Image (cartoon, coloured by chain):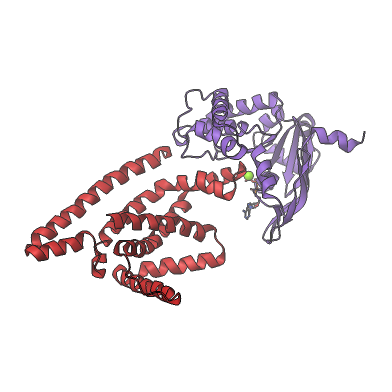
Chain colours: A red, B purple
Amino acid sequence: MFIAFGAFALGLVIGMFGAVGKLYGGAVAREGLELYTTIVRSVPELVLILIVYFAGADLINAVIGLFGQDPIEINGALAGIWVLGFVQGAYSTEVIRGAILAVPQGQIEAARAYGMGSFLTLRRVTLPAMLPYAIPGLSNLWLIAMKDTALLAVLGFGELTQITRQAAGATKSYFTFFLAAGCLYLIASLVSNFLARRLERRARRGIA
Amino acid sequence: MSESEGNASTEAIHAEQIHKRFGALEVLKGVNLSARKGDVVAIIGGSGSGKSTFLRCLNCLDHPTSGSLRINGEEVRFKPDGHGDLAPASRQQIRQLRSRLAMVFQNFNLWQHRTLLENMIEAPVHVLGVPRKQAIEEGKRLLDRVGLNDKHDAYPAFLSGGQQQRAAIARALAVDPLAMLFDEPTSALDPELVGEVLKVIQSLADEGRTMILVTHEMAFARDVATRVVFFHNGVVEEEGPPSEFFSNPQSERLQKFLSNFN
Ligand SMILES: Nc1ncnc2c1ncn2[C@@H]1O[C@H](COP(=O)(O)OP(=O)(O)OP(=O)(O)O)[C@@H](O)[C@H]1O
Ligand SMILES: [Mg+2]
């Protein structure tokens, strides 16, 4: 859950900058982000996780090697957050970009007409106004983030799934433990859905 | 005392030779227009004659292609924007000007995610730096003034067009504007709601507010304006005080245009 939350949060931050960059950035930023979202969204997550993890680890160790240090063992949870967050960021970028485009242009124009600069407009008008359009997509992403932590098991540091496997392996009652794990995922999803709906209701308070 | 000095103290807006082109289309072909403090200038003209574009050039929402602009005696500084138009040279200056040239839009454009009162205080607090408490008091007073006493905490989308436009006018008043720019403020309203908005605008004219008002309401323009300007094809075709302008139009085009409204 901690990994999922971290990855989701990192994804949100990337998504926010990504969406703004895609919509208002220069040509280079736009092309770069387009490449990022297209590739990340078209390659299967599992493959991507493996690539980013091993490439990332190699890269870090290469950099460290340059400074003459010994290679380090990469912290599992932290790596998980970075890897999943990188993937989530691509989806967040698209969700937020779409939501910003759904904000009526007149709202942004009014902000400019009353003397708001681009940053102030973004902070006071564009971002809060796009929330109601973004929350459904973002809550989906959160569910995916939770479930994707299971994929991290292949790297040997999954959360629930990994522990379940160990527990199941130790006691040999696979079915019970995986059923229990499934139920836990389900409960977490249901709670998330409930919270997302309340958030959405609040964000939509100005929409008739 | 020279004449220009005398003008400087009473002049609110002075636009000279404003040109604006969108690609190959030249929408404004050298518009001259000035307003003294307290003037109510009504702009009329056919669809596509450049009325909105001119209004948007006044606060640089659109960048003029060429021309010069003086607001409240202060020359707006321009530099080429790299697309063949003129961008404001100083963002600081333009932000300051915009925050005092309050715009009222055809489609109200209230911020939907904020209550009416929050709409009132947004620009004063975040652009002008007015203390929040003071802005709230003023915002309440202005909402009451336009007859929205019981709607302070309502969200715009749940109000009628007339109520939204009155709130938008109150939002404009909240920045203590040098001049107010109205772009067809009643065109998006159901006929029965037009009156309530015109009444508010009339009351602003009565208290001597400087206003530039694009409108298709000829009767209202005649009543409220100190001067009427007829746009045709991107230039000012004719202008004058309403009495003469409407009863004795000089140009054939204006005569033809006015005959559509009788
Ligand atoms: N951003 C833009 N890009 C390209 N063309 C534009 C743009 N804005 C306006 N125009 C064109 O400029 C011309 C003048 O438009 P403008 O909105 O100023 O007319 P108007 O006098 O306000 O008309 P109306 O009474 O219909 O509001 C129109 O032909 C319009 O299509
Ligand atoms: Mg117009």
Residue that protrudes farthest toward the right in the picture: B1
x 45%, y 34%: residue? B155
Where A190 sits versus B156, above or below? below
Q: Quadrant of the C terminus of chain A?
A: top left
Quarter occupied by residue B82: bottom right
State left or right for residue A85 relative to residue B215. left
Q: Quadrant of the N terminus of chain A?
A: bottom left
Where A126 sits versus A79, above or below? above
**Image location of residue B243, percent across then percent down:** 77, 29
Residue that protrudes farthest toward the left in the picture: A172
State left or right for residue B201 relative to residue A52. right
State left or right for residue B84 relative to residue A196. right
Looking at the image, can residue B181 be seen? no
Counting labels gives: 0
Looking at the image, can residue B25 be seen? yes
x 50%, y 34%: residue? B118
| Depth order, front residue of B34/B112 | B112
Where A47 sits versus B211, above or below? below
x 76%, y 46%: residue? B69
**Image location of residue A94, percent across then percent down:** 42, 59
| Depth order, front residue of B90/B157 | B90
x 55%, y 49%: residue? A119
| Depth order, front residue of A174/B160 | A174
Quarter occupied by residue B248: top right
Where B176 sits versus A129, above or below? above
**Image location of residue B55, percent across then percent down:** 68, 43
